[in-house]
Amino acid sequence: MQIILNEALKLHPLNKSKIIAGVKGLNRPIDQFGVLETPDSFHFVKSNEFLMTTGYLFKDNTELQYKIIKELYNRGVCALGIKINRYIKEFSPEVIDFCNTYNFPLIYIPNEYGWYDFFSPLLYLMHIIQLDTNKDILNKMTTLSDFILNSNSFDEIAKHIYKIFNIPCYIHINYNDISASYPPKSSISKIQITKLIEKFQNTENTFAIKDIKRIVFEDKSILFSDIKHKTSCYGYIILYEKNGELNFENISLFQYVLTCVQSYVNRFLNSNRKFSAKQNKFLLQLVNNKIIDKIALLCESNELNIDLYNDYIVAVSKDSPISQYEDLDKIYTFIENNINLKYKVLSAFEFNGNYIVFSPVNRDISSIQNYKNTKLKIIKIQKEFKSFFHINDFSFGIGTYYPSIDGIRTSYNEAIRAFESYKKFFNKDFIINFKDLGIYSILSNPAVNKDIQNFANKYIKPIIAFDKKNNSELLITLKYFFEYHRSFRSCAKEMHLHHNTIRYRLKKIEELCHVDTASENDLLELEISLKLLPFINKSIDN
């Protein structure tokens, strides 16, 4: 039976979705649902189908994005939900315009949930509940998720679950051994959780429905499930059936309850983090505000448990994939556990791509050793981010050490400059200290960009054009020639050629560039031009 899309989006976890485009189409009906992941799967979709995808099938092809979205619309698909930042960061402007023009809903769905989590409540409504009760059940489920997710304690949740099923409920959370049961003094509160866990893990006990087992314990029937997020187990939830009186429909509703409780537990654990949105905001203000009230900052930093009496070397990446579509609770947890606590640093991030690391300075060692230690941390943090976000490129600029609170902002600005200066020349991964920028600090100055390009192209562009036309290796020969200290024989040995071949190629370069390789000045200009090759490549690409 049909469900209206706007009503489906009230159910957890779809209630955490965001509308990317096509907001006027939320009154579309849902007859069925499915997953869109293979290149030809859009040929088999049905009218009024609610599709979900990771975007893998069109991750590197904006034309295919548009083609598939248009085809889904033409086939009468209800909507497309997508997990942003799994394989794509955003849709092309053409796709957004199309969806808005034709009222085709394009919906961000949170990454941390599996397909079953999204489909389970819809399946419950569509295939178990009768037509005349569907609206009442939908309202009941919406109220249920709102109550659980906005509860103040696990005791409140246990009591509410008891009211729904009219049987005792027990919740156990591993964190600080938290327990809640309702009724408070029922026999279920006296059951040893370890014995139930053993029975739950016993493969002889089968599942009554996904993730939920019916266990016989002391001649009583118990519905038992672990509370988990991905592979991590946070705790357990139990319904004390006594005589197995819950039917399949109620067990299915319990499955929805479980999904809501899992989200509440995840948020509860995240609220106990040491790294929070408040700390993130404070650190961003610290580096972005030009006027600093040091006394006010120190007072606020004490409340947030941030040590501003220490000095910091600041590192910045502008390649961060963190966006407003991410599950931010998940991001804060990752940064706290995998970055801040692990490497003893502070972090902050913005949605514009800036990710900032504050590495504390050890005043008992030299500045050189502090820079070395900071760079080693950044190398490890770089690997953590690549693994967590499944990305290949994640570069950093590192500032200089300055004492005091004012020095933190100065170090930050240098880190930004180091990143931006190097990024103009190198697309691949890099970690560059501001103090090691050298000539790139001058070359990255916008005021001299045109002069640099003209200078480099004067010598290198003719060589590149000749190599491309004749399939030759003049440019690589010139590179080896300078690497091996302008020695014809050393260059020839490295390239497995006769030294006369190298001489012939250098003569050809003389003709193309109108230089004399016997002139020290001409050789110097050739060598400098060669050093600017990354800059030339980027200008050619553009």
Image: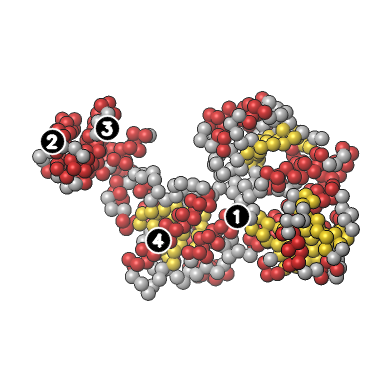
Res 265 → quadrant: bottom right
Q: Which amino acid lies under the numbered mark 4 shown in the image of this protein?
A: Leu
Q: How far apart are marks 4 and 2 (CA)?
A: 46 Å
Judged from the image, the secondary structure of the residue bearing numbered disc 2 is helix
Residues at badges 3 and 4 in contact (C-beta under 8 Å)?
A: no
Q: Mark 4 points at which residue?
A: 376
Pinpoint residue 63: horizontal percent, then vertical percent. Answer: 53, 29
Q: Mark 2 points at which residue?
A: 500
- The label nearer to you, 2 versus 3, is 2
Dot 4 or dot 2: first in sequence order is 4
Q: Distance between the residues labelled 2 and 1?
A: 63 Å
Q: Distance between the residues labelled 3 and 4?
A: 38 Å
- The label nearer to you, 1 versus 4, is 4
Q: Distance between the residues labelled 1 and 4?
A: 25 Å
Judged from the image, the secondary structure of the residue bearing numbered disc 1 is helix
Q: Is residue 479 visible?
A: yes
Pinpoint residue 365: horizontal percent, then vertical percent. Answer: 36, 72
Q: Which amino acid lies under the numbered mark 3 shown in the image of this protein?
A: Ile
Question: For this rendering, which residue is in front, 495 or 143?
Answer: 495
**Number of labelled discs?**
4
Please state if 373 lies on the left or on the right of 283 as rendered: left
Q: Name the residue under label 1.
A: 330
Dot 1 or dot 4: first in sequence order is 1
- The label nearer to you, 4 versus 2, is 2
Residues at badges 2 and 1 in contact (C-beta under 8 Å)?
A: no
Q: In this view, does 535 lie above or below 414?
A: above
Question: For this rendering, which residue is in front, 510 or 200?
Answer: 200
Residue drawn at the location 53% of the way across and 60% of the way down: 338
Q: Name the residue under label 3.
A: 464
Judged from the image, the secondary structure of the residue bearing numbered disc 4 is helix
Q: Can residue 155 be seen in this view?
A: no
Residue drawn at the location 87% of the way across and 37% of the way down: 131
